[in-house]
Amino acid sequence: MTTEATSSEKYLEVQRSAEFAGLRRKLRNFVFPMTIAFFLWYALYVLLSAYARGFMSVKIVGHINIALLFGLLQFLTTFLIAWYYSRYAARELDPTADKIKAELDEAAH
Amino acid sequence: MLNIVAAESASSRPLTITLFLIFVAITLAITIWASRQTKTATDFYAGGRQFTGFQNGLAIGGDYMSAASFLGIAGLIALYGYDGFLYSIGFLVAWLVALLLVAEFLRNSGRYTMADVLAFRMRQRPVRTAASVSTIVVSIFYLIAQMVGAGALVSLLLGIKPGTTFLGMDADTAKVATIILVGALMIVYVVVGGMKGTTYVQIVKAFLLMTGALVMTILVLAHYKFNLSTLLGDAAAQSGKGEAFLEPGLRYGVESASGSATFYSKMDLLSLGIALVLGTAGLPHILTRFYTVPTARVARKSVLWAIGIIGTFYLFTLALGFGAAALVGGKAITAQDKAGNTAAPQLAQALGIDYLGGATGGAILLAIIAAVAFATILAVVAGLTLASSSSVAHDFYASVIKRGNAGERDEVRVARISAFVIGAVAIVLSIFAQSLNVAFLVALAFAVAASANLPAIIYSLFWRRFNTSGALWSIYGGLIAAVVLVFFSPVVSGSPTAMFPDSDWHFFPLNNPGIISIPIGFLCGWIGTVISKETDPEKYAELEVRSLTGHGAH
């Protein structure tokens, strides 16, 4: 509960700092393009299911067709993006976030 | 293969009821234990914020994997093949929105409810009122769909046919009794156990559901010597639809002689997919789960666990659905329930007969899976009731009525009363709605969450200029757009499967409003913002710094 002790000037100061700007840039440069990417990737899958049924029904092995593989690929990419984000966050975001938080907590006491 | 399910489900009835009573007894014991641990508002609203990432991941799964997921998707796959699988994928991909854009920032800057973040830098009373309204609308829609579904399911799972009686009740009375029982239990979990009790109920349920689905998946695959292609081939052959059963198009985006009908059907599929993906991260009962862990980093971990658990579960349903199509058969399933909701229990019975030695084995496995389905319904409705009563007490009562001057005890008391009232209202509405086709309410809840809540959350967290007017415009704009479009759609009137099949006032051609209402929500948020001069750079600095670093987090 350190908020009351931290003035709004302090927040503005941190927000303007190069360190925080770097953290925000690294976060936004990851999450915004990634969100657009997986959304388009999912939309492509749904659109193909609606409009490219000939392509989706092509069989690969036995009764396993492109539609099924494409669907399973959506599972795989979801798992991979989640894993990749957690790795990226732990390496690129968390240390800077912790540092700024520690400075703010220190200043508030 | 199996047309004896009705008689069988009657014979497995005592076991189903016994298992269900054991589940109720265990969860009530947990609830009473949790109530002794619940002393502060943080305990009641956020379970003391002491759950681990794994525990909360399981609880998220428990909150999210409703009976509509377990029985509904398995049934869809069993009857329509590939399209049921297509439907399940949106529910999983959606979690990336929660992971990348919402969970951690919400945990860092909020306290108990979605409105804590939305109202952070805005005028409290109007924004909290709006957030409360949309929370209650989403939760009530979802609740009614679940409770009506519960009533119908129980008669199916216990094999109470029209014309027969159970404990002196005919099928219709049993439905009403079930809705009241489910509602009463849900009220007890929430009022007595708060977030702690509810979370443990969800953990137990998620564990049971995953175990049940895993065992059945292994049995199905073992039947086909772990060859997926053989399973698919058999399912396609048994379905009577051939290879089309393994391809998209039997349920969604159906092609017909009419060009415009085909076009709307495909638009509907797209609209549904978008609403599922963008709606999840705007569901109030999901958002409040992120407050039950100590830090944003644990919230991230819990979403990672949830993605793993939910993804695995939908892979199981793939095997269950195609397994039911192959081993039970579409005819035997639709003979029990036209919507296919009994496909998974019927499959359990078939597998039990196969592996556990005859009819007794079938009855045992059927009873277990039926009991798991009841547990599933109970956990989901409890989560919904908790989220909406928290919003009434914390947002509406404490901030709007008491203008932030309510004591902690007072607030929790109001939350408990609200849970009771919301639960009672949901019971009454569900009893009135039970003869109507209300399955569309789940999709509508996702559409409102995506159109009203998500734009406001995203703008709040990431757009400096966003203000009170923008928040109100996006919430009310998205909410009204989604509800009005559905009201004038074929799911409410003007089609044989509509809520009111004998009337017709529809003019909007799609069943799912998302493709129109979500852009309206985002657009309204932008318009509302730019027409107002209000801006608060200091508060945005505080929100941004806190949400990204965790400084000052509750």
Image (cartoon, rainbow, N blue to C red):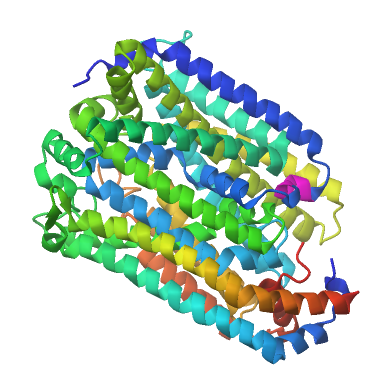
- Compared with residue B441, is residue A17 higher up or lower down, i.e. above or below? below
Location of residue B77 in the rendering, given as x and y in whole percent from the top left corner: 27, 42
Depth check: B300 or A49 in front? B300
Q: Is residue B55 above or below residue B304?
A: above
Q: In the orientation shown, which residue stands out farthest toward the right?
A: A109
Q: Nearer the viewer, residue B76 or B187?
A: B76
Compared with B437, B481 (above or below) is below
Q: Quadrant of residue B215?
A: top left
Q: Is residue B205 magenta?
A: no
Task: Identify the residue at horizontal 42%, vertical 66% (top origin).
Answer: B517
Locate the C terminus of chain B and report the quarter of the image it occupies: bottom right
Can residue B494 be seen here? The reply is no
Quarter where residue B192 is shown? top right
Residue A80, can we see it? yes
Task: Look at the image and tell me in which quarter the N terminus of chain B lies.
Answer: top left
Question: Residue B10: x and y, percent?
Answer: 37, 12
Task: Look at the image and give the residue range highlighted in magenta.
Answer: B42-47
